[in-house]
Amino acid sequence: MGLSCLAAVFFTGCGGPAYEMEYSAAAQISSFNVLPVSSTKKAGAFAEDLCVVTEDIVDDEALDMSQAEAAGLFDLNNRQALYAKNVHERLYPASLTKIMTALVALENGSLDQVLTATNTVNITESGAQLLGLKSGDTMTLDQALHFLLMYSANDVAMLIAENIGGSVEEFVDMMNREALRLGATNTHFVNPHGLSDDEHYTTAYDMYLIFNEAVKYDTFSEIIHMTSYQTTYYDRNGAEKPASINTTNQFLSGKYDSPESVTVIGGKTGTTNAARSCLVLLARDAAGAPYISVILKAETGDILYAKMTDLLGQINK
């Protein structure tokens, strides 16, 4: 990119045409599929269809984010960052990692593909969210993505990684290659679930880039919009294993309300002792225009949702 183009990006923030929003989930551009399908392979740190943030965009008097380490609010239609605090600081992503896990799986697998569990699903870390998979259990990728994104099951992340990548290690390499393709250059993954590791990190801006890519897939956007899910998978002998889950997103569950005239479509939660409380959301305003909001390392879950509500409130300013 020439110097004149870089200057234009820096001083204008983001550029590109606005898209009309339709409310049909089947539409090419809708509350679920917010960007044109034709652009799914077009990305980069300074791509013209993305918002570029070079420095903080904060107003401490209008929005107190002192109890969150990093936060960002991105207007997708106008390619503009409305708020940005420490968006390039490397932090632990916790289960926000699973957004990339789902993205790589959707890019490289098929929804009806049958996945078979091995002993790699045996996660013993205390407090880790688990579906309870056993070696020999089988389910489709479609089922696995529901457990991954709605329930944040760490053992299901391992199931997806091994079956789609051939090995967990190769799948993680695929995750890192995809991050680089998207321009998420401050991100590095060492596992598909997000349990803490010193070399496993991302930034609020990189999570915007990754989530922005993932919501181009109807399946992803429809799953993160769901509040509950019931299905049946099978054990190694073919016996049925019924499962019923609810979303971990407390805006969708009704525990917290979004600001007036702002609708939360869906998102992904993440919580570990090291990462604290994290959340990425897709929301829309009263006219249907889409926004991505990100908060990393809020002090507690209650603070996370209170601060996210305040952040979403900036949409109406």
Image: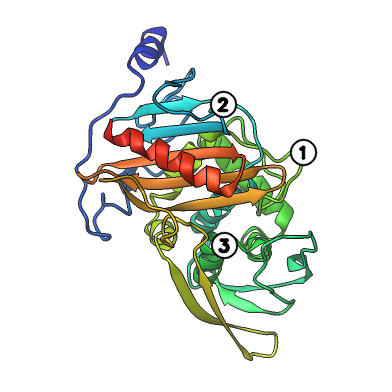
Q: Which residue is denoted by mark 3 in the rendering? A: 148
Q: Which residue is denoted by mark 1 in the rendering? A: 198
**Residue 315 visible in the current orientation:** yes
* Disc nearer the start of the sequence (2/1): 2
* Disc nearer the start of the sequence (1/3): 3
- Residues under labels 2 and 1: Cα distance? 17 Å
Tell me how many marks there are.
Answer: 3
Q: Estimate how packed mark 1 is, as few (under 14), some (14 to 19) or many (20 or more) residues with alpha carbons within 10 Å.
A: few
* Disc nearer the start of the sequence (2/3): 2
Instruction: State the residue at coordinates (22%, 39%).
Output: 19
Badge 1 amino acid: Asp
186 over 152 or under it: above or below: above
Q: Secondary structure at mark 3?
A: helix
Instruction: State the residue at coordinates (35%, 12%).
Output: 11
Q: Secondary structure at mark 2?
A: loop
61 over 114 or under it: above or below: above
Q: Estimate how packed mark 3 is, as few (under 14), some (14 to 19) or many (20 or more) residues with alpha carbons within 10 Å.
A: many
- Residues under labels 2 and 3: Cα distance? 26 Å
Q: Position of residue 149 (x, y in %)?
A: 52, 60
Where residue 310 sits, quadrant-wise, is top left
Q: Which residue is denoted by mark 2 in the rendering? A: 88
**Residue 41 visible in the current orientation:** no
Q: Estimate how packed mark 2 is, as few (under 14), some (14 to 19) or many (20 or more) residues with alpha carbons within 10 Å.
A: many
80 over 6 or under it: above or below: below
157 over 116 or under it: above or below: above
Q: Secondary structure at mark 1?
A: loop
Q: Position of residue 184 (x, y in %)?
A: 55, 33
Which quarter of the rendering shows the N terminus?
A: top left
Where residue 135 sits, quadrant-wise, is bottom right
Q: Position of residue 276 (x, y in %)?
A: 65, 44
Instruction: State the residue at coordinates (44%, 62%).
Output: 253
Badge 3 amino acid: Leu
